[in-house]
Amino acid sequence: MPELPEVQTVVNTLSPRVSGSLIVSGTVIRSDILTPEGCDFIAGIVGRRVNRVFRRAKRILFALDDGNHFYIHLGMSGRIRIESSDAPPAKHTHLLIDFRTQTGEELQVRFIDPRRFGGVWWVGQDWEDPNLGPEPLDLSATGLAARLDGTKRFVKCALLDQAVIAGLGNIYVDEALHVAGIHPLTRTHRLTREQIAALSKAIKTVLKRAIKHRGSTLRDYVDADGVTGDFQKIHRVYGREDQACLSCGETIKRIVVGGRSTHFCRVCQPRKPASA
DNA sequence: GTCCATGTTCTTTA
DNA sequence: CTAAAGAACATGGA
């Protein structure tokens, strides 16, 4: 479910309820979702107040009032829900955190993840990860060019690599490449300056629009309040194999690149840049 | 039963 | 060395 826009949407729904709230108790239902394994996560969080909740890449970070941090990564199927502690927990609920807000309201944050590719990481003071690339919304065209320089990878693969640029996933890479008019199998060193400028702009446009639409709900993604996104309704290529391109009418193709489904229009995204 | 899935990481191959 | 390909992780839906 979660790429940058979905994770940002979860943060946007979580933050107003959880920022400033006190953690009164917590329960780890499945301890194998915790990293480092065997850490006393509950002891680290109970009695702490959450200073802020924020997103970095696809991670949801919680900054505690003692300077420590933890983050939740949703993996493929993870969800976070704010619910009352008396509501029966959904199947595959792995973690419960009970909060008291500054207005005295009691609420429970739940981490649910059937496939368990996601999890919870206790990271202490130092929450930034040197292996993560820059945030797409803060990255200039020149910056992106520098990140793509010195490699001959397929642009699709490079953009999925979180060390190159952090937060894009399979949906938004396909969508951004279509908006930029770039074929997914283009080698990064073959991208022209103009193409990189278009790509940089397309990434930002697509992500901002997707956040405005509260992300894409393909199967069961919902935000912390249980609300679905609707950006999937305006996907231009992702999940549209064999349908007409919304720009030119050509049939959308699906190929496999780097083991991932890749959707594109071969007219709007020619292998070679359109010659003048 | 089959194939596929919004992610990441490790191993193998070239 | 780089990078591509494949598998692995675990569950559920079509």
Image: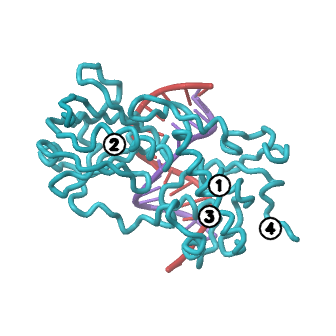
Chain colours: A cyan, B purple, C red
**Of pointers 2 and 3, the one earlier in the residue sequence:** 2
Say which chain tag 2 marks: A
The nearer-to-camera label among 4 and 3 is: 3
Q: Which mark is residue A273?
A: 4
Q: Where does residue A254 sit, x and y in percent of width and height?
A: 72, 46
Q: Chain ID for label 1?
A: A
Q: Are marks 4 and 3 in contact (CB under 8 Å)?
A: no
Residue A88: name its quadrant: top left
Q: Secondary structure at mark 4?
A: loop
Q: Nearer the viewer, residue A215 or A161?
A: A215
Compared to residue A236, the image places residue A162 above or below, namely: below
Q: Quadrant of residue A149?
A: bottom right
What residue does disc 2 label? A15
User: Sequence-wise, which precedes: disc 4 or disc 2?
Assistant: 2
Sequence-first tag of 1 and 2: 2
How far apart are the alpha carbons under marks 1 and 3?
Answer: 9 Å
Q: As shown in the figure, which amino acid type bears the numbered disc 3?
A: Ser
Q: CA distance from mark 1 to mark 2?
A: 28 Å
Closer to the camera, A118 or A137?
A137
Confirm or deny contact between disc 4 and disc 1 (CB under 8 A): no
A269, A64: nearer the viewer: A64
Do the residues marked 1 and 3 share a common chain?
yes
- Judged by depth in the image, the label closer to the viewer, 2 or 3, is 2
- Tell me the residue at 71%/65% (across/down): A186
Q: Is residue A57 left or right of residue A272?
A: left
Task: List x then y, in percent, for residue B13.
Answer: 58, 65
Residue wearing tag 1: A176
Question: Looking at numbered disc 1 in the image, what kind of residue is underneath it?
Answer: Ala
Front position in the image: A205 or A87: A205
From the image, tell me which residue sits under label 3: A200
